[in-house]
Protein backbone atom coordinates (compact mmCIF):
# COMPACT_ATOMS: atom_id res chain seq x y z
CA UNK A 1 0.00 0.00 0.00
CA UNK A 2 1.13 3.55 -0.67
CA UNK A 3 2.76 5.57 2.06
CA UNK A 4 0.69 8.05 4.11
CA UNK A 5 1.52 11.38 2.42
CA UNK A 6 -0.69 14.34 3.41
CA UNK A 7 0.49 16.63 0.63
CA UNK A 8 -0.31 13.97 -1.97
CA UNK A 9 -3.82 13.59 -0.60
CA UNK A 10 -4.33 17.36 -0.48
CA UNK A 11 -3.07 17.83 -4.03
CA UNK A 12 -5.23 15.00 -5.27
CA UNK A 13 -8.33 16.21 -3.38
CA UNK A 14 -7.99 19.96 -4.00
CA UNK A 15 -11.25 20.02 -5.97
CA UNK A 16 -13.04 18.29 -3.10
CA UNK A 17 -11.55 20.79 -0.63
CA UNK A 18 -12.69 23.71 -2.77
CA UNK A 19 -16.22 22.36 -3.14
CA UNK A 20 -16.61 21.69 0.59
CA UNK A 21 -15.30 25.17 1.51
CA UNK A 22 -17.53 26.87 -1.06
CA UNK A 23 -20.68 24.95 -0.16
CA UNK A 24 -20.03 25.40 3.56
CA UNK A 25 -19.43 29.14 3.23
CA UNK A 26 -22.56 29.58 1.10
CA UNK A 27 -24.59 27.59 3.60
CA UNK A 28 -23.35 29.71 6.49
CA UNK A 29 -23.99 32.90 4.48
CA UNK A 30 -27.61 32.00 3.70
CA UNK A 31 -28.24 30.86 7.26
CA UNK A 32 -26.72 34.01 8.77
CA UNK A 33 -28.48 36.24 6.27
CA UNK A 34 -31.85 34.60 6.95
CA UNK A 35 -31.39 35.32 10.67
CA UNK A 36 -29.97 38.81 10.16
CA UNK A 37 -31.53 41.83 11.83
CA UNK A 38 -30.47 45.48 11.73
CA UNK A 39 -30.99 47.74 14.73
CA UNK A 40 -30.84 51.54 14.89
CA UNK A 41 -30.49 53.03 18.39
CA UNK A 42 -30.37 56.51 19.83
CA UNK A 43 -31.16 58.22 23.14
CA UNK A 44 -33.07 61.41 23.93
CA UNK A 45 -33.50 63.54 27.05
CA UNK A 46 -36.50 65.61 28.12
CA UNK A 47 -35.05 68.76 29.69
CA UNK A 48 -38.03 70.87 30.78
CA UNK A 49 -38.33 71.87 34.44
CA UNK A 50 -41.40 69.77 35.26
CA UNK A 51 -40.18 66.53 33.67
CA UNK A 52 -39.30 65.12 37.10
CA UNK A 53 -43.06 65.20 37.74
CA UNK A 54 -43.85 63.54 34.41
CA UNK A 55 -45.10 66.78 32.87
CA UNK A 56 -44.46 68.37 29.49
CA UNK A 57 -43.45 72.07 29.07
CA UNK A 58 -47.09 73.15 28.82
CA UNK A 59 -47.98 71.35 32.06
CA UNK A 60 -49.79 68.39 30.49
CA UNK A 61 -48.85 64.79 31.21
CA UNK A 62 -46.03 63.50 29.01
CA UNK A 63 -46.66 60.37 26.94
CA UNK A 64 -43.44 58.92 25.49
CA UNK A 65 -45.40 56.45 23.35
CA UNK A 66 -46.13 59.42 21.09
CA UNK A 67 -42.65 58.84 19.66
CA UNK A 68 -44.13 56.04 17.55
CA UNK A 69 -47.65 57.43 17.28
CA UNK A 70 -49.55 57.21 13.99
CA UNK A 71 -49.06 60.92 13.33
CA UNK A 72 -45.29 60.73 13.75
CA UNK A 73 -44.88 57.49 11.77
CA UNK A 74 -47.09 58.79 8.95
CA UNK A 75 -44.91 61.90 8.68
CA UNK A 76 -41.77 59.76 8.48
CA UNK A 77 -43.29 57.54 5.78
CA UNK A 78 -44.24 60.63 3.78
CA UNK A 79 -40.77 62.18 4.17
CA UNK A 80 -39.03 59.01 2.99
CA UNK A 81 -41.66 58.25 0.34
CA UNK A 82 -42.03 54.70 1.64
CA UNK A 83 -44.62 52.23 0.40
CA UNK A 84 -45.66 50.58 3.66
CA UNK A 85 -48.30 50.66 6.38
CA UNK A 86 -47.96 52.60 9.63
CA UNK A 87 -48.23 49.48 11.80
CA UNK A 88 -45.44 47.84 9.84
CA UNK A 89 -43.02 50.41 11.27
CA UNK A 90 -44.71 51.02 14.65
CA UNK A 91 -44.49 47.35 15.62
CA UNK A 92 -40.70 47.43 15.37
CA UNK A 93 -40.16 50.46 17.60
CA UNK A 94 -39.25 50.21 21.26
CA UNK A 95 -38.89 53.03 23.79
CA UNK A 96 -37.21 52.16 27.09
CA UNK A 97 -36.43 54.45 30.03
CA UNK A 98 -32.79 54.84 31.04
CA UNK A 99 -32.74 54.70 34.83
CA UNK A 100 -29.48 55.55 36.67
CA UNK A 101 -28.09 53.02 39.13
CA UNK A 102 -28.53 55.38 42.06
CA UNK A 103 -32.24 55.62 41.31
CA UNK A 104 -32.48 51.85 41.26
CA UNK A 105 -30.82 51.79 44.68
CA UNK A 106 -33.24 54.46 45.98
CA UNK A 107 -36.18 52.49 44.66
CA UNK A 108 -35.00 49.27 46.28
CA UNK A 109 -34.37 51.06 49.58
CA UNK A 110 -37.84 52.60 49.54
CA UNK A 111 -39.43 49.22 48.77
CA UNK A 112 -37.48 47.58 51.59
CA UNK A 113 -38.70 50.26 54.00
CA UNK A 114 -42.26 50.06 52.72
CA UNK A 115 -42.17 53.69 51.52
CA UNK A 116 -43.62 55.02 48.32
CA UNK A 117 -41.20 55.74 45.51
CA UNK A 118 -41.90 57.92 42.50
CA UNK A 119 -39.41 58.59 39.76
CA UNK A 120 -40.04 59.91 36.26
CA UNK A 121 -37.18 59.11 33.87
CA UNK A 122 -35.76 61.92 31.77
CA UNK A 123 -33.67 59.78 29.41
CA UNK A 124 -35.08 57.23 26.99
CA UNK A 125 -33.52 54.78 24.57
CA UNK A 126 -35.26 54.48 21.22
CA UNK A 127 -34.72 51.30 19.21
CA UNK A 128 -35.88 50.40 15.72
CA UNK A 129 -35.21 46.91 14.37
CA UNK A 130 -35.74 45.49 10.88
CA UNK A 131 -35.23 42.06 9.36
CA UNK A 132 -33.01 40.81 6.57
CA UNK A 133 -35.43 42.13 3.93
CA UNK A 134 -34.20 45.65 4.74
CA UNK A 135 -30.75 47.20 5.08
CA UNK A 136 -28.76 48.87 7.84
CA UNK A 137 -29.09 52.27 6.16
CA UNK A 138 -32.86 51.79 5.92
CA UNK A 139 -33.10 51.35 9.71
CA UNK A 140 -31.01 54.49 10.28
CA UNK A 141 -33.02 56.60 7.83
CA UNK A 142 -36.37 55.52 9.29
CA UNK A 143 -35.31 56.23 12.87
CA UNK A 144 -33.89 59.60 11.84
CA UNK A 145 -37.13 60.52 10.02
CA UNK A 146 -39.24 59.42 13.00
CA UNK A 147 -37.14 61.54 15.38
CA UNK A 148 -37.45 64.61 13.14
CA UNK A 149 -41.21 64.21 12.95
CA UNK A 150 -41.42 63.65 16.70
CA UNK A 151 -39.48 66.87 17.35
CA UNK A 152 -42.00 68.69 15.17
CA UNK A 153 -44.93 66.95 16.86
CA UNK A 154 -43.52 67.59 20.35
CA UNK A 155 -42.89 71.26 19.63
CA UNK A 156 -46.32 71.83 18.11
CA UNK A 157 -48.12 70.09 20.97
CA UNK A 158 -46.11 71.11 24.02
CA UNK A 159 -43.81 74.01 23.14
CA UNK A 160 -44.74 76.05 20.07
CA UNK A 161 -45.73 79.66 20.50
CA UNK A 162 -48.59 81.00 18.41
CA UNK A 163 -47.70 82.58 15.07
CA UNK A 164 -50.13 85.36 14.09
CA UNK A 165 -51.89 84.97 10.72
CA UNK A 166 -51.36 87.37 7.85
CA UNK A 167 -54.84 88.91 7.53
CA UNK A 168 -53.71 91.14 4.69
CA UNK A 169 -53.16 88.17 2.39
CA UNK A 170 -56.84 87.81 1.44
CA UNK A 171 -57.45 91.39 0.31
CA UNK A 172 -56.91 90.64 -3.36
CA UNK A 173 -59.50 87.83 -3.31
CA UNK A 174 -62.24 90.06 -1.84
CA UNK A 175 -63.98 93.11 -3.25
CA UNK A 176 -62.94 95.56 -0.54
CA UNK A 177 -63.09 99.28 -1.02
CA UNK A 178 -59.75 101.09 -1.06
CA UNK A 179 -60.08 102.55 2.42
CA UNK A 180 -61.27 99.19 3.81
CA UNK A 181 -58.26 97.42 2.27
CA UNK A 182 -55.88 99.86 3.92
CA UNK A 183 -57.71 99.47 7.24
CA UNK A 184 -57.20 95.69 7.04
CA UNK A 185 -53.56 96.18 6.11
CA UNK A 186 -53.03 98.56 9.02
CA UNK A 187 -54.66 96.19 11.50
CA UNK A 188 -52.59 93.25 10.22
CA UNK A 189 -49.34 95.24 10.29
CA UNK A 190 -50.12 96.48 13.81
CA UNK A 191 -50.79 92.97 15.12
CA UNK A 192 -47.66 91.50 13.57
CA UNK A 193 -45.53 94.46 14.66
CA UNK A 194 -46.73 94.03 18.27
CA UNK A 195 -45.99 90.31 17.97
CA UNK A 196 -42.47 91.07 16.73
CA UNK A 197 -41.92 93.59 19.53
CA UNK A 198 -42.76 90.87 22.05
CA UNK A 199 -40.40 88.37 20.39
CA UNK A 200 -37.73 91.04 20.08
CA UNK A 201 -37.91 91.63 23.82
CA UNK A 202 -37.94 87.93 24.74
CA UNK A 203 -35.33 86.68 22.23
CA UNK A 204 -33.10 89.66 21.31
CA UNK A 205 -30.16 87.48 20.19
CA UNK A 206 -32.05 84.91 18.15
CA UNK A 207 -31.28 84.88 14.40
CA UNK A 208 -32.89 82.32 12.12
CA UNK A 209 -30.46 80.36 9.97
CA UNK A 210 -33.08 79.84 7.26
CA UNK A 211 -33.91 83.54 6.79
CA UNK A 212 -30.88 85.27 8.31
CA UNK A 213 -33.19 87.70 10.17
CA UNK A 214 -33.61 88.55 13.83
CA UNK A 215 -36.91 89.70 15.29
CA UNK A 216 -35.37 93.16 15.56
CA UNK A 217 -34.75 93.22 11.80
CA UNK A 218 -38.29 92.09 11.05
CA UNK A 219 -39.84 94.54 13.52
CA UNK A 220 -37.99 97.41 11.86
CA UNK A 221 -39.41 96.37 8.50
CA UNK A 222 -42.99 96.30 9.81
CA UNK A 223 -42.44 99.50 11.75
CA UNK A 224 -41.37 101.24 8.54
CA UNK A 225 -44.44 99.91 6.72
CA UNK A 226 -46.70 101.08 9.55
CA UNK A 227 -45.19 104.56 9.78
CA UNK A 228 -44.61 105.29 6.07
CA UNK A 229 -46.31 102.96 3.58
CA UNK A 230 -49.71 102.69 5.28
CA UNK A 231 -50.04 106.45 5.99
CA UNK A 232 -49.01 107.11 2.39
CA UNK A 233 -51.88 104.99 1.10
CA UNK A 234 -54.31 106.69 3.50
CA UNK A 235 -53.19 110.10 2.29
CA UNK A 236 -53.58 109.13 -1.38
CA UNK A 237 -57.09 107.73 -0.83
CA UNK A 238 -58.37 110.62 1.26
CA UNK A 239 -56.79 113.29 -0.94
CA UNK A 240 -58.23 111.83 -4.15
CA UNK A 241 -61.40 110.51 -2.49
CA UNK A 242 -60.87 107.25 -4.34
CA UNK A 243 -63.62 104.65 -3.90
CA UNK A 244 -65.09 101.66 -5.66
CA UNK A 245 -68.67 102.50 -4.54
CA UNK A 246 -69.21 105.71 -2.61
CA UNK A 247 -72.77 104.92 -1.49
CA UNK A 248 -71.78 101.51 -0.12
CA UNK A 249 -68.79 103.10 1.63
CA UNK A 250 -70.97 105.72 3.35
CA UNK A 251 -73.55 103.10 4.30
CA UNK A 252 -70.91 100.89 5.93
CA UNK A 253 -69.47 103.82 7.84
CA UNK A 254 -72.97 104.79 9.07
CA UNK A 255 -73.50 101.21 10.25
CA UNK A 256 -70.11 101.25 11.93
CA UNK A 257 -70.91 104.50 13.76
CA UNK A 258 -74.29 103.13 14.88
CA UNK A 259 -72.71 99.95 16.18
CA UNK A 260 -70.03 101.88 18.05
CA UNK A 261 -72.69 104.16 19.61
CA UNK A 262 -74.58 101.13 20.89
CA UNK A 263 -71.35 99.72 22.36
CA UNK A 264 -70.62 103.09 23.96
CA UNK A 265 -74.07 103.27 25.56
CA UNK A 266 -73.69 99.74 26.97
CA UNK A 267 -70.16 100.38 28.22
CA UNK A 268 -71.10 103.74 29.77
CA UNK A 269 -74.01 102.08 31.58
CA UNK A 270 -71.72 99.34 32.88
CA UNK A 271 -69.15 101.90 33.94
CA UNK A 272 -71.77 103.91 35.86
CA UNK A 273 -72.96 100.83 37.74
CA UNK A 274 -69.39 99.79 38.55
CA UNK A 275 -68.56 103.29 39.76
CA UNK A 276 -71.59 103.24 42.10
CA UNK A 277 -70.52 99.83 43.46
CA UNK A 278 -66.98 101.06 43.92
CA UNK A 279 -68.15 104.11 45.85
CA UNK A 280 -70.46 101.93 47.97
CA UNK A 281 -67.72 99.39 48.72
CA UNK A 282 -65.29 102.17 49.46
CA UNK A 283 -67.56 103.72 52.16
CA UNK A 284 -68.40 100.34 53.69
CA UNK A 285 -64.82 99.26 53.63
CA UNK A 286 -63.65 102.36 55.49
CA UNK A 287 -66.43 102.11 58.08
CA UNK A 288 -65.85 98.39 58.57
CA UNK A 289 -62.15 98.93 59.05
CA UNK A 290 -62.68 101.71 61.63
CA UNK A 291 -65.22 99.64 63.51
CA UNK A 292 -62.96 96.60 63.45
CA UNK A 293 -60.05 98.60 64.88
CA UNK A 294 -62.31 100.08 67.64
CA UNK A 295 -63.64 96.63 68.59
CA UNK A 296 -60.13 95.25 68.66
CA UNK A 297 -59.01 97.87 71.21
CA UNK A 298 -61.98 97.12 73.52
CA UNK A 299 -62.00 93.34 73.26
CA UNK A 300 -61.55 91.11 76.34
CA UNK A 301 -58.69 88.61 76.20
CA UNK A 302 -60.71 85.97 78.10
CA UNK A 303 -63.72 85.97 75.77
CA UNK A 304 -63.60 83.20 73.16
CA UNK A 305 -66.85 84.45 71.58
CA UNK A 306 -65.34 87.88 70.84
CA UNK A 307 -62.30 86.18 69.23
CA UNK A 308 -64.51 84.20 66.89
CA UNK A 309 -66.52 87.26 65.89
CA UNK A 310 -63.34 89.21 65.32
CA UNK A 311 -61.90 86.44 63.10
CA UNK A 312 -65.05 86.34 61.05
CA UNK A 313 -65.00 90.09 60.77
CA UNK A 314 -61.39 90.07 59.54
CA UNK A 315 -62.39 87.59 56.82
CA UNK A 316 -65.18 89.91 55.75
CA UNK A 317 -62.74 92.80 55.49
CA UNK A 318 -60.38 90.72 53.29
CA UNK A 319 -63.22 89.65 51.03
CA UNK A 320 -64.37 93.24 50.66
CA UNK A 321 -60.87 94.35 49.70
CA UNK A 322 -60.54 91.59 47.11
CA UNK A 323 -63.92 92.42 45.59
CA UNK A 324 -63.03 96.10 45.55
CA UNK A 325 -59.82 95.42 43.58
CA UNK A 326 -61.71 93.32 41.05
CA UNK A 327 -64.24 96.10 40.57
CA UNK A 328 -61.50 98.65 40.01
CA UNK A 329 -59.82 96.44 37.40
CA UNK A 330 -63.10 95.83 35.60
CA UNK A 331 -63.91 99.54 35.68
CA UNK A 332 -60.53 100.40 34.16
CA UNK A 333 -60.98 97.79 31.42
CA UNK A 334 -64.44 99.15 30.50
CA UNK A 335 -63.09 102.71 30.36
CA UNK A 336 -60.34 101.54 28.04
CA UNK A 337 -62.96 99.98 25.77
CA UNK A 338 -64.92 103.24 25.86
CA UNK A 339 -61.82 105.17 24.83
CA UNK A 340 -61.14 102.79 21.95
CA UNK A 341 -64.77 103.05 20.82
CA UNK A 342 -64.55 106.83 20.84
CA UNK A 343 -61.39 106.76 18.71
CA UNK A 344 -62.95 104.29 16.25
CA UNK A 345 -66.13 106.44 16.04
CA UNK A 346 -64.09 109.56 15.44
CA UNK A 347 -62.16 107.80 12.65
CA UNK A 348 -65.36 106.49 11.05
CA UNK A 349 -67.00 109.91 11.21
CA UNK A 350 -63.95 111.50 9.62
CA UNK A 351 -63.96 109.00 6.76
CA UNK A 352 -67.69 109.55 6.29
CA UNK A 353 -67.25 113.29 6.24
CA UNK A 354 -64.52 113.05 3.59
CA UNK A 355 -66.56 110.93 1.22
CA UNK A 356 -69.95 112.59 2.00
CA UNK A 357 -69.15 115.41 -0.40
CA UNK A 358 -67.58 113.24 -3.08
CA UNK A 359 -68.60 114.78 -6.41
CA UNK A 360 -68.52 111.42 -8.19
CA UNK A 361 -70.16 108.26 -6.91
CA UNK A 362 -67.28 106.05 -8.09
CA UNK A 363 -63.67 107.26 -8.33
CA UNK A 364 -61.31 104.48 -9.39
CA UNK A 365 -57.52 104.63 -9.54
CA UNK A 366 -55.37 102.06 -11.29
CA UNK A 367 -52.22 103.45 -9.67
CA UNK A 368 -53.74 103.20 -6.20
CA UNK A 369 -54.92 99.66 -6.80
CA UNK A 370 -51.45 98.75 -8.06
CA UNK A 371 -49.85 100.31 -4.95
CA UNK A 372 -52.21 98.36 -2.65
CA UNK A 373 -51.52 95.08 -4.48
CA UNK A 374 -47.79 95.78 -4.41
CA UNK A 375 -47.90 96.39 -0.65
CA UNK A 376 -49.97 93.22 -0.13
CA UNK A 377 -47.41 91.23 -2.14
CA UNK A 378 -44.61 92.76 -0.09
CA UNK A 379 -46.45 91.94 3.15
CA UNK A 380 -46.91 88.35 1.98
CA UNK A 381 -43.16 88.09 1.34
CA UNK A 382 -42.30 89.70 4.66
CA UNK A 383 -44.79 87.47 6.46
CA UNK A 384 -43.12 84.40 4.95
CA UNK A 385 -39.89 85.56 6.61
CA UNK A 386 -41.73 86.13 9.88
CA UNK A 387 -43.32 82.70 9.74
CA UNK A 388 -40.07 80.91 8.87
CA UNK A 389 -38.21 82.79 11.60
CA UNK A 390 -40.91 82.07 14.19
CA UNK A 391 -41.06 78.41 13.11
CA UNK A 392 -37.31 78.07 13.57
CA UNK A 393 -37.63 79.75 16.96
CA UNK A 394 -40.19 77.13 17.95
CA UNK A 395 -37.82 74.39 16.82
CA UNK A 396 -35.02 76.07 18.77
CA UNK A 397 -37.14 76.24 21.90
CA UNK A 398 -38.28 72.66 21.40
CA UNK A 399 -34.66 71.52 21.02
CA UNK A 400 -33.91 72.99 24.44
CA UNK A 401 -36.61 70.80 25.94
CA UNK A 402 -35.86 67.70 23.89
CA UNK A 403 -32.20 66.84 23.40
CA UNK A 404 -30.45 64.03 21.55
CA UNK A 405 -27.85 62.35 23.75
CA UNK A 406 -26.03 60.57 20.94
CA UNK A 407 -26.16 60.14 17.19
CA UNK A 408 -27.94 57.17 15.68
CA UNK A 409 -25.96 53.94 15.98
CA UNK A 410 -26.79 51.07 13.64
CA UNK A 411 -25.70 47.52 14.33
CA UNK A 412 -26.29 44.12 12.77
CA UNK A 413 -27.15 41.06 14.82
CA UNK A 414 -24.83 38.85 12.78
CA UNK A 415 -21.51 40.00 11.32
CA UNK A 416 -21.79 38.07 8.07
CA UNK A 417 -18.25 38.92 6.91
CA UNK A 418 -16.70 37.43 10.02
CA UNK A 419 -18.98 34.41 9.77
CA UNK A 420 -17.95 33.83 6.16
CA UNK A 421 -14.24 34.10 6.98
CA UNK A 422 -14.58 31.72 9.93
CA UNK A 423 -16.70 29.32 7.89
CA UNK A 424 -14.11 29.31 5.09
CA UNK A 425 -11.36 28.48 7.57
CA UNK A 426 -13.50 25.77 9.20
CA UNK A 427 -14.65 24.15 5.98
CA UNK A 428 -11.19 24.37 4.43
CA UNK A 429 -9.97 22.39 7.41
CA UNK A 430 -12.90 19.97 7.07
CA UNK A 431 -12.19 19.69 3.34
CA UNK A 432 -8.53 18.93 3.99
CA UNK A 433 -9.43 16.28 6.55
CA UNK A 434 -11.99 14.87 4.12
CA UNK A 435 -9.47 14.82 1.28
CA UNK A 436 -6.96 12.97 3.47
CA UNK A 437 -9.61 10.48 4.60
CA UNK A 438 -10.89 9.93 1.06
CA UNK A 439 -7.36 9.62 -0.26
CA UNK A 440 -6.39 7.15 2.40
CA UNK A 441 -9.55 5.13 1.85
CA UNK A 442 -8.75 5.16 -1.86
CA UNK A 443 -5.30 3.80 -1.00
CA UNK A 444 -6.87 1.00 1.06
CA UNK A 445 -9.35 0.16 -1.68
CA UNK A 446 -6.67 0.23 -4.31
CA UNK A 447 -4.39 -1.89 -2.17
CA UNK A 448 -7.06 -4.46 -1.44
CA UNK A 449 -8.64 -4.66 -4.89
CA UNK A 450 -5.99 -3.56 -7.33
CA UNK A 451 -2.59 -4.31 -5.75
CA UNK A 452 -0.69 -7.56 -6.04
CA UNK A 453 0.22 -8.66 -2.53
CA UNK A 454 3.53 -10.22 -3.58
CA UNK A 455 5.03 -7.58 -5.83
CA UNK A 456 3.17 -4.59 -4.31
CA UNK A 457 2.48 -3.45 -7.85
CA UNK A 458 -0.89 -2.87 -9.54
CA UNK A 459 -2.40 -6.30 -10.24
CA UNK A 460 -3.83 -7.70 -13.45
CA UNK A 461 -7.28 -6.10 -12.89
CA UNK A 462 -5.65 -2.70 -12.52
CA UNK A 463 -3.57 -3.30 -15.64
CA UNK A 464 -6.70 -4.18 -17.60
CA UNK A 465 -8.47 -1.07 -16.31
CA UNK A 466 -5.56 1.14 -17.27
CA UNK A 467 -5.30 -0.43 -20.72
CA UNK A 468 -9.06 -0.05 -21.24
CA UNK A 469 -8.81 3.64 -20.42
CA UNK A 470 -6.03 4.17 -22.96
CA UNK A 471 -7.84 2.05 -25.54
CA UNK A 472 -10.62 4.63 -25.72
CA UNK A 473 -8.34 7.18 -27.33
CA UNK A 474 -5.51 7.44 -29.83
CA UNK A 475 -2.10 7.19 -28.22
CA UNK A 476 0.09 10.25 -28.16
CA UNK A 477 3.49 10.45 -29.73
CA UNK A 478 6.40 8.74 -27.91
CA UNK A 479 4.23 6.42 -25.86
CA UNK A 480 6.31 3.37 -24.91
CA UNK A 481 5.05 -0.04 -23.80
CA UNK A 482 7.58 -2.22 -21.93
CA UNK A 483 7.05 -5.91 -21.12
CA UNK A 484 9.25 -7.85 -18.69
CA UNK A 485 9.35 -11.61 -18.16
CA UNK A 486 10.90 -13.05 -14.95
CA UNK A 487 12.61 -16.19 -16.22
CA UNK A 488 13.86 -17.71 -12.93
CA UNK A 489 10.43 -17.77 -11.26
CA UNK A 490 9.24 -21.18 -12.56
CA UNK A 491 12.56 -22.91 -11.88
CA UNK A 492 12.65 -21.52 -8.33
CA UNK A 493 9.09 -22.65 -7.65
CA UNK A 494 9.84 -26.17 -8.85
CA UNK A 495 13.19 -26.57 -7.09
CA UNK A 496 12.72 -24.67 -3.80
CA UNK A 497 9.02 -24.06 -3.49
CA UNK A 498 6.41 -21.35 -3.95
CA UNK A 499 7.46 -19.48 -0.81
CA UNK A 500 10.87 -18.86 -2.36
CA UNK A 501 9.19 -17.85 -5.60
CA UNK A 502 6.93 -15.46 -3.74
CA UNK A 503 9.91 -13.90 -2.03
CA UNK A 504 11.64 -13.53 -5.40
CA UNK A 505 8.53 -11.84 -6.84
CA UNK A 506 8.49 -9.49 -3.86
CA UNK A 507 12.14 -8.55 -4.35
CA UNK A 508 11.77 -8.16 -8.10
CA UNK A 509 8.62 -6.11 -7.71
CA UNK A 510 10.46 -3.73 -5.40
CA UNK A 511 13.29 -3.39 -7.95
CA UNK A 512 10.89 -2.68 -10.82
CA UNK A 513 8.87 -0.22 -8.75
CA UNK A 514 12.00 1.66 -7.79
CA UNK A 515 13.33 1.67 -11.37
CA UNK A 516 10.02 2.88 -12.90
CA UNK A 517 9.29 5.50 -10.24
CA UNK A 518 9.87 8.45 -12.57
CA UNK A 519 8.68 6.87 -15.82
CA UNK A 520 5.05 5.93 -15.57
CA UNK A 521 2.69 3.01 -14.93
CA UNK A 522 4.15 -0.42 -14.08
CA UNK A 523 1.94 -3.37 -13.16
CA UNK A 524 2.12 -7.14 -12.60
CA UNK A 525 0.19 -9.08 -15.24
CA UNK A 526 0.62 -12.49 -13.54
CA UNK A 527 2.78 -15.60 -14.20
CA UNK A 528 6.00 -13.61 -13.98
CA UNK A 529 4.97 -10.97 -16.54
CA UNK A 530 5.18 -7.21 -15.94
CA UNK A 531 3.75 -4.48 -18.15
CA UNK A 532 4.91 -0.89 -18.16
CA UNK A 533 3.23 1.98 -20.03
CA UNK A 534 5.28 5.15 -20.19
CA UNK A 535 3.65 8.18 -21.83
CA UNK A 536 5.98 10.84 -23.24
CA UNK A 537 8.86 8.37 -23.25
CA UNK A 538 11.05 8.26 -26.35
CA UNK A 539 13.19 5.27 -27.29
CA UNK A 540 16.40 6.62 -25.71
CA UNK A 541 14.55 7.19 -22.45
CA UNK A 542 13.12 3.64 -22.59
CA UNK A 543 16.60 2.26 -23.18
CA UNK A 544 17.83 4.28 -20.21
CA UNK A 545 15.12 2.60 -18.09
CA UNK A 546 16.22 -0.87 -19.22
CA UNK A 547 19.81 0.03 -18.45
CA UNK A 548 18.86 1.23 -14.96
CA UNK A 549 16.81 -1.93 -14.38
CA UNK A 550 19.67 -4.17 -15.43
CA UNK A 551 21.99 -2.31 -13.08
CA UNK A 552 19.60 -2.73 -10.15
CA UNK A 553 19.19 -6.47 -10.92
CA UNK A 554 22.94 -6.86 -11.07
CA UNK A 555 23.34 -5.24 -7.66
CA UNK A 556 20.66 -7.55 -6.27
CA UNK A 557 22.32 -10.68 -7.69
CA UNK A 558 25.63 -9.67 -6.17
CA UNK A 559 24.03 -9.53 -2.75
CA UNK A 560 21.95 -12.69 -3.15
CA UNK A 561 24.29 -15.32 -4.59
CA UNK A 562 21.91 -18.19 -3.77
CA UNK A 563 19.12 -16.73 -5.90
CA UNK A 564 19.67 -14.85 -9.14
CA UNK A 565 17.16 -12.80 -11.08
CA UNK A 566 17.03 -13.31 -14.81
CA UNK A 567 14.47 -11.56 -17.01
CA UNK A 568 13.66 -10.69 -20.59
CA UNK A 569 12.74 -7.15 -21.60
CA UNK A 570 11.21 -5.78 -24.77
CA UNK A 571 9.43 -2.58 -25.73
CA UNK A 572 7.53 -0.91 -28.54
CA UNK A 573 7.22 2.83 -29.20
CA UNK A 574 4.16 4.45 -30.78
CA UNK A 575 6.23 6.86 -32.84
CA UNK A 576 8.91 4.46 -34.04
CA UNK A 577 6.49 1.63 -34.68
CA UNK A 578 3.75 3.94 -35.94
CA UNK A 579 1.22 2.19 -33.70
CA UNK A 580 -1.30 4.38 -31.85
CA UNK A 581 -3.50 1.67 -30.37
CA UNK A 582 -2.48 0.48 -26.90
CA UNK A 583 -3.39 -3.16 -27.34
CA UNK A 584 -1.61 -3.42 -30.68
CA UNK A 585 1.44 -1.73 -29.15
CA UNK A 586 1.47 -4.25 -26.27
CA UNK A 587 1.24 -7.18 -28.67
CA UNK A 588 4.16 -5.76 -30.67
CA UNK A 589 6.25 -5.61 -27.46
CA UNK A 590 5.37 -9.25 -26.54
CA UNK A 591 6.19 -10.42 -30.06
CA UNK A 592 9.61 -8.84 -29.79
CA UNK A 593 10.20 -10.58 -26.47
CA UNK A 594 9.52 -13.95 -28.11
Image (cartoon, rainbow, N blue to C red):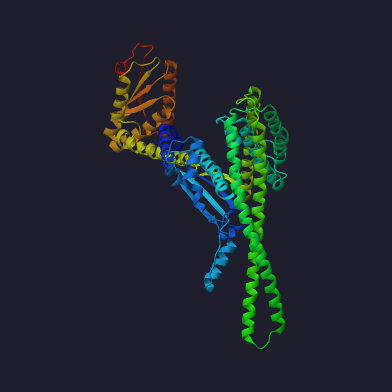
Locate the N terminus and report the quarter of the image it occupies: top left
Residue 232 position (above or below residue 303)? above
Q: In which quarter of the image is residue 349?
A: top right
590 or 289, which lies in front?
Answer: 289
* Residue located at (71% from left, 47% from top): 201
Q: Position of residue 222 (x, y in %)?
A: 69, 37
Q: Which residue is outermost to the left?
A: 494
368 or 459, which lies in front?
Answer: 368
505 or 264, which lies in front?
Answer: 264
- Determine whether, in the image, residue 493 is placed left or right of residue 114: left
Q: Is residue 462 visible?
A: yes
* Residue located at (64% from left, 68% from top): 320
258 or 6, which lies in front?
Answer: 258
- Determine whether, in the image, residue 263 is placed left or right of residue 566: right
Locate the C terminus and report the quarter of the image it occupies: top left
- Determine whether, in the image, residue 206 is placed left or right of residue 557: right
Residue 540 position (above or below residue 4)? above
Q: Quadrant of residue 11?
A: top left
* Residue located at (53% from left, 39% from top): 141
* Residue located at (65% from left, 50% from top): 338
Q: Is residue 404 visible?
A: no
Number of labels in the image equals 0
Q: Position of residue 378 (x, y in %)?
A: 65, 30
Q: Where is residue 513 in the image (x, y as percent from the top left)?
A: 40, 30
- Determine whether, in the image, residue 252 is placed left or right of residue 284: left
Q: Where is residue 142 in the image (x, y as percent from the top left)?
A: 51, 41
Amino acid sequence: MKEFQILRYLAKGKLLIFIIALVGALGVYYYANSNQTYTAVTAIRYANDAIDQGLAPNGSELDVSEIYSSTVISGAIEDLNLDCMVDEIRSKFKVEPIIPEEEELKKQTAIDKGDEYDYFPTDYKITYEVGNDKSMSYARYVLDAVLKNYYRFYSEKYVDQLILPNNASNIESNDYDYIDSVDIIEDSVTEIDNYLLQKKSMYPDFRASATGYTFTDLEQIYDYIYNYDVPGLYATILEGKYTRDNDVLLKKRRETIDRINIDLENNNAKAAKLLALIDNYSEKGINSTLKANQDASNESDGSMIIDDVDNNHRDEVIDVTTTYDDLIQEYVAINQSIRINEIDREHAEYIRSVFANNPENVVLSDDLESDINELVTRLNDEYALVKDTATELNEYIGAQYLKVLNSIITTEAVNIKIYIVLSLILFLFIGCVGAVIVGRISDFVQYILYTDKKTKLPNRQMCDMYIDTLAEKVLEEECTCIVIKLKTLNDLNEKVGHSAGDMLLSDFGRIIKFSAKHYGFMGYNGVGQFIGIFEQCAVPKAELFIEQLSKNIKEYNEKHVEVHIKCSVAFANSTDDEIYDIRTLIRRAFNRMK
